[in-house]
Amino acid sequence: MARNTQVPADHDAPPITRILAEYVAKHPSRGWNDAVDHEAHRTFLNWLGCAVGAAKHEAADAALAAVNELQPAPQATVAGRSERVDMASAALVNGITSHTFDFDDTHLKTIIHPAGPVASALLALAEHKGMGGRDVVDALVLGIDVACRLGNLVYPEHYDRGWHITGTTGMLGAAAGCARLLKLDADRTQMALGIAASQPVGLREQFGTMTKPFHPGGAARAGLMSALLAAKGFTASPRALEAPRGWAQVVSTKTAWNEATDELGQRFEISFNSYKPFACGIVIHPSIDAAAQLRAQGVRPEQVERIELRVHSLVLELTGKKEPADGMQGKFSVYHGVAAGLMFGRAGEDEYHDDIVTRADMVALRRKVVATVDDSIDEASADVTAVLTDGRKVHVFVEHTIGSLQNPMTDAMLEGKFTQLAEPVIGAAKTKQLIQACWGLGKAKDLRALTALARP
Amino acid sequence: MARNTQVPADHDAPPITRILAEYVAKHPSRGWNDAVDHEAHRTFLNWLGCAVGAAKHEAADAALAAVNELQPAPQATVAGRSERVDMASAALVNGITSHTFDFDDTHLKTIIHPAGPVASALLALAEHKGMGGRDVVDALVLGIDVACRLGNLVYPEHYDRGWHITGTTGMLGAAAGCARLLKLDADRTQMALGIAASQPVGLREQFGTMTKPFHPGGAARAGLMSALLAAKGFTASPRALEAPRGWAQVVSTKTAWNEATDELGQRFEISFNSYKPFACGIVIHPSIDAAAQLRAQGVRPEQVERIELRVHSLVLELTGKKEPADGMQGKFSVYHGVAAGLMFGRAGEDEYHDDIVTRADMVALRRKVVATVDDSIDEASADVTAVLTDGRKVHVFVEHTIGSLQNPMTDAMLEGKFTQLAEPVIGAAKTKQLIQACWGLGKAKDLRALTALARP
């Protein structure tokens, strides 16, 4: 059911975040009259009495039992680090790091990055509890199914309003997955979903800051804690998702309920998951893919007179930066992307380091790229012709870019991507073993062998 | 700026919370084809590579530094319990317990319960860090000011949409207060507010379940962690509150920006805080107050032939339950409230125990209450006449009920309420000392003396 509530954005709001921050940081101590100061003491006294008074309530017992599960720490691995922390914090940090390079997976129907919230919660819980890999894979499929189905239910209106959908559905996927891993019954699982429903994490305004990857991390943590609370008897509304004042109707005006239930248990949303081959926005991917194909056909940078690139107008609108000054700007330059594809045959995080983006031969190569708008070409396609110094032309048309659902990355490509990411952090030997441990996940008796490999 | 987006509620949604819970709990292990199972392994491999790859990023450093502040636990007191836990968990649990009886404070302009999120975060942080009371009082005033000003900015549209405003502004108040307590500069404080802005906690659908008091607890925890993250260099949008896709415009269509800034540093929203004298919905308070005044004037239950109660129609609409069967139902019975006021002169949590609500003399007394609707009487008032067996009539009209801004609870009444709540949990001696410690908060050198008194 779609209900129209397009609200015009207010771009002229005063800088209240800054104003309040200055106020909080700089207002003098006791910079008010005695009545205000006394009211603060009354507020504190009244608050403390209420807290002490309810200390034996069953809600307090359940909440304490859940947070006591976080002690004694350390409990779980932070992937790629030697530190181990409590499992909720591990879920948070792994959720953050997995999305930091914007290089993770994408459920293309909703642009949810589902593994960040779900896998981060599951791995931390499974490591601490010594659970087996089969249970983790089951929980991963079901948790991602819940997050993405609920995403389908509210997308795109929810995203358009300004929510970062990865963290505002992810806590539900993480709660579902952790409930499954804890083998909660349907009643307790329902409570876990309910507790999680109150905790959406993520605003699109945060894009470009560390709080963007915080969203899947925060969602992982919230979902894990929701399942622990439900396991200890904490209660929530049994209709927390669908009620008039429940999650879906509060965060969205589109509520396509059938998306939660159609073909449930037969169609699995993880089947529509995709993986980024290149560490930049998806709109540049077809151009990089085409350039890498030119390289695979033997074209070398020094042979190139010019590269003619024909793409949809959106590509230049979003990523038309001709002279990127650093790695971050490079991610918004289709010119750099084409140069990287031709120079290296890839565009991972390494190819967006500052020193690559500013390297003289890369600057020279990207200046040879001539981009033309052609809206008869799909956004997901690219048409590239290399005009060589000897007059020859080599043409590549990419209809479905590598990493799309029509043309998915092969397992070998995923291994290559993994290696490029992991080797600098944990070394070549552990990287190889960790890849094998991932492929054998469903048969692993205890996740701790895998997490040990993820530490340097 | 008010922008109209009233969306009709959908009351006919299918029970998807239940359907998904059954699915997650009961779908068989590996109940899908090999392609789905393989996709799960690809998803896991790709996710882990991304997490390992970003493990040395500055976002990972900042996040780990913040969560490492939670170790080693125990760090902070759970009020009224012997357990101590990490400070983030203490903030969570104290936020839960302080709102469990629905007996805490109320900023009447917005119906925010401000101390739950703000004080819970501050006390945990101050105890762990060994901070002094003056800093805590300053942070409490400023944190509550931020939460309630932002509440004014979006209320009532935000609340009407279905958000539980205590937890959806509270994380900002807690972040502000903790930033102040940590003496962060304006830049870092701005980041703390920004990180918190992505984490609203609370749906009104949860009312009547443990997840309602979870909201201030979750907000306390989120605000505390946001300040710790900001202190370690974690970044967020500097316009996270006001930008088109920032907090205010995403969670509300009313955005009265001036509420954030008018008389900033001169008017303090804590001045408009109020405290509940009775452990039930505020709409019953004038009637209980009137009955307690009858008792103070010498009227005894055994003298009463009948009690004539005249109230606004809303009172009976919300709390017209004539024969409550237990304590929970008693909270929705103005008849029980009047009986408690006359019998005990008070209606704290004790007077809503099941055995009081079903006690024979209480049942007999409440059956003598005859309620009449009179919409010329304000919702915040009550007109009560006791008709005695000897024919005399004793009349009380309450215009401004006790606990209202016009007729606030005295300090002595607050002490009485505190004692009734705390004595059964920590005993009479500690209760007295703890009250004195609260009044002396602003002069306390180290909060740990106070928190020690809050443990049984």
Image (tube, coloured by chain):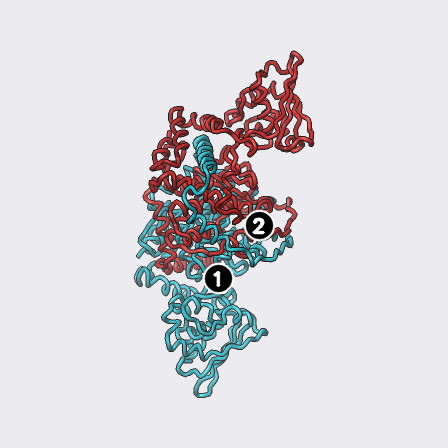
Chain colours: A cyan, B red
Q: Which numbered disc, 2 or 1, marks the residue closer to the eye?
A: 2
Q: Chain of mark 1?
A: A
Amino acid at dot 1: Ser
Q: Quadrant of the C terminus of chain A?
A: bottom left
Which type of secondary structure does the marked residue at label 1 adopt?
strand
- The answer as to whether the residues below labels 2 and 1 share one chain is no
- Residue A253 pos. (x, y %): 61, 52
The residue that label 2 is drawn on is B256
The residue that label 1 is drawn on is A274
Left/right of residue B58 with respect to residue A144 in the rendered view: left
Left/right of residue A430 with respect to residue A236 in the rendered view: left
Q: Is residue A414 above or below residue A134?
A: below
Q: Nearer the viewer, residue B151 or A252?
A: B151
**Is residue B373 visible in this depiction of the protein?**
yes
- Residue B53 pos. (x, y %): 37, 60
Local crowd size for mark 2, using a 10 Å CA cut-off: few (<14), some (14–19), many (≥20): some
Amino acid at dot 2: Ala
